[in-house]
Structure formats: C-alpha cells, structure tokens
Image (tube, rainbow, N blue to C red):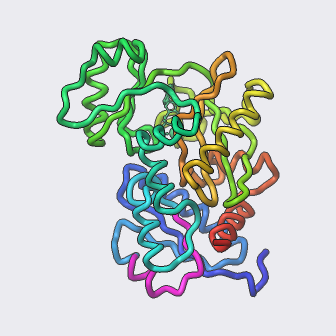
Amino acid sequence: MTSGADKLSVAVLRGGTSAEREVSLNTGEQVSRALGERGHAVTCLDTADLVFIEALRTGGFDVVFICLHGRFGEDGTVQGLLELLGLPYVGSGVLASALAMDKVMSKHIFRAEGIRTPDSVVLRAGETPDFGAIVSRLGEKVVVKPVSEGSSVGMSIVHEPAELPDAVSLAFEHDRTVLVEAFVAGAEVTVGVVGNNDPVALPTLEVVPEHEFYDYESKYVPGMSAHIIPARVSEEARAECQRVALHAHRALDCRGMSRADTIVTATGEVYLLEVNTIPGMTSTSLLPDAARAAGIEFPELCERLVRLALER
Ligand SMILES: Nc1ncnc2c1ncn2[C@@H]1O[C@H](COP(=O)(O)OP(=O)(O)O)[C@@H](O)[C@H]1O
Ligand SMILES: [Mg+2]
C-alpha cells in the first residue's frame, strides 16, 4: 500500500480508435484496478472522444499511464500531446515510440546497430511489386506485414509464391507501406525490459501458439497460446535474447518498458522481429507474466512504471 504522501492522481488512457481498441480497454481496466489497489486515485479516459484532451489539460493529474496500442497511442502521437501538456507519462517518448511502431524504420536502426533481424523487402503503394525478385531474395516462405500495425493485423504467412500477391494486397488494406520478411523457423521468445537509464531484462518467455503463428486470436483468447518461462532454448540463447532486448531498448532510446519479440533458430541464432513500446499490460499478458516470474507482481509492476515516469 502507498502512504498518503505517495498517493498520486493517475490518468489512464485507453480505448482509442486503433485496430487494438478492445485490447486497450482491457489493459486500461486492469492497470486502473492495480493502481487503485496501490492506493492511487485513477481516472480512465477513452481517447476515442477528443474531450479527453481537455480532461488532461484541466484534470490536475500527476502522471499519465498510456494503455493504448497501435496507432494514436503507441506511435508517438499521444506522447507528443502529453509533452505539450507538460504531463509525465509511462513509457517511451515521441521518437522511440514512432520508430518502434514502424517496422521498416526500426529495422534500419537494428541493422545499423548490428542486431540480427530477418532479411526483408519494402513495398510502397503505387509501385508494382516484382514478386519473382522477392521470392529469389527471401525464399518461398515469407511473412507479409503492414508496416505500422500491431497485434498481427493484416499480416500473413505465405507458404508458396502463388499466395504472395493476395497477402500483399491484404497488407496494403492496412498501410501504405508493406514489409515482406524472410520466414525464420524457430522458437518465439519475447523479452520484457523495464527501466530508464539502467534498464533490466526480465526472464525470457517462450510463446507457443495453438495456431501457425502468434496471430490476433493466439494473443488475446485465453488458452490459445502457452507461456513458458524461461524459454526452452539454451542458456546462451536466453542470455543472447536478453542482450538483444536491452540493446534494442537502448538503440531506440526506449523509456520505462519495452518488449522485444525474437525468434531463436535451432542453432541458437537470435532474430529480432520488433520492439513493442506499449506491450499488452493485462495481468496475464507477456511482459507482466515475465515480471511475475522475476518476483514482481502486477500491481507492483504498474507502480514501478509510474515511478519511472516521474523519474524524468
Ligand atoms: N520473419 C518471421 N518469421 C517467422 N515468424 C514470424 C516472422 N515475423 C512474424 N512472425 C510471426 O508473426 C507474429 C507477429 O509478428 P510481429 O513482427 O511480432 O508483429 P506484431 O506483433 O506487431 O503483429 C510473431 O509473433 C511470429 O509468430
Ligand atoms: Mg509482435
């Protein structure tokens, strides 16, 4: 419990208009409850209605916990608004949020930093893709993703070249830029990172989806994926995953928290897929699960994140 002097007025931003609205409502609900349990005064604001801006401006909040995923929340836009309003907030700033949200831009940074990430081709709306060239470069099995969506929205795994054009069209329904990545076979290992200047990596968590990949349903329907902590890969590969997650957190200049999604091949090579700056934060989500394995219960995790936001 928090003593009177430490009691904070916290605004929790949730909902919004992105493809991940439902997830965000759930995250916001659980974070609010956890912070309430810690003795803080919590106000939930749904960002789908822009009156939330006025509420933030006049509400006298000490800190804002952004529980929004995807566009207009995880991408730097809301972070920019909070900078203008002079309100401290949980998580990364404008630039890190925008970079991490854009899978093409973040891959530029990973490559420049020597972090291994799957080989890829970028397609832009209006250009005619050379499907033959894509297949000869990346192989027949590829993953097609809209550049700025999360939660596997608009994404497909392509098993043979004939499926590629439809997969690309689907991704273009969600974004002007589409990423085609070489498929990397291996264990899916995700690593949460918590901290500002001296971040620490949480234990590795292996995700075992019921479906072929960690799609929307696997992520949000209970029982559709198993979490195994630590990941069933070698000791060295686990350490490498944690090293990569910390390296990526620093390279993108993330603050507060992040979660790196990686694939570990049978030979122990670690490929970084992406960094999430506002990972799922229900009590059974990946980062909170890993934190619990490290002895940090969910309310304590939320409390720490709020304290990290105020540290700046
Ligand atoms: N290059 C790849 N090779 C193999 N599987 C992949 C690859 N890229 C993505 N996946 C699968 O798709 C899931 C979602 O991809 P990811 O890049 O993390 O995007 P997001 O989580 O933002 O939708 C991953 O967790 C993994 O299951
Ligand atoms: Mg992911």
Residue 164: image quadrant is top left
Residue 180: image quadrant is top left
Q: In what quadrant of the picture does the C terminus appear? A: bottom right
Instruction: Residue 49 in the image: state x and y as whole percent.
Output: 34, 71
Image check: 135 left or right of 28? left
Instruction: Residue 43 in the image: state x and y as whole percent.
Output: 53, 76
Give the answer, above or below, for where 193 lies relative to 126.
below
Is 55 in the magenta? Answer: yes
Instruction: Residue 113 in the image: state x and y as whole percent.
Output: 57, 39
Question: Nearest the camera: 212 or 125?
Answer: 125
The residue depicted at 60 percent of the width and 42 percent of the height is 260
The residue depicted at 48 percent of the width and 34 percent of the height is 215
The residue depicted at 46 percent of the width and 39 percent of the height is 108
Instruction: Residue 50 in the image: state x and y as whole percent.
Output: 34, 73
- Find the magenta span and give its range: 53-66
Is 155 in the magenta? Answer: no
Report the number of numbered marks.
0
The residue depicted at 39 percent of the width and 59 percent of the height is 72
Give the answer, above or below, for where 38 lies relative to 108.
below
Give the answer, above or below, for where 38 lies relative to 173.
below
Image check: 234 left or right of 91? right
Residue 149: image quadrant is top left
Q: In what quadrant of the picture does the N terminus appear? A: bottom right
Give the answer, above or below, for where 239 lies relative to 289.
above
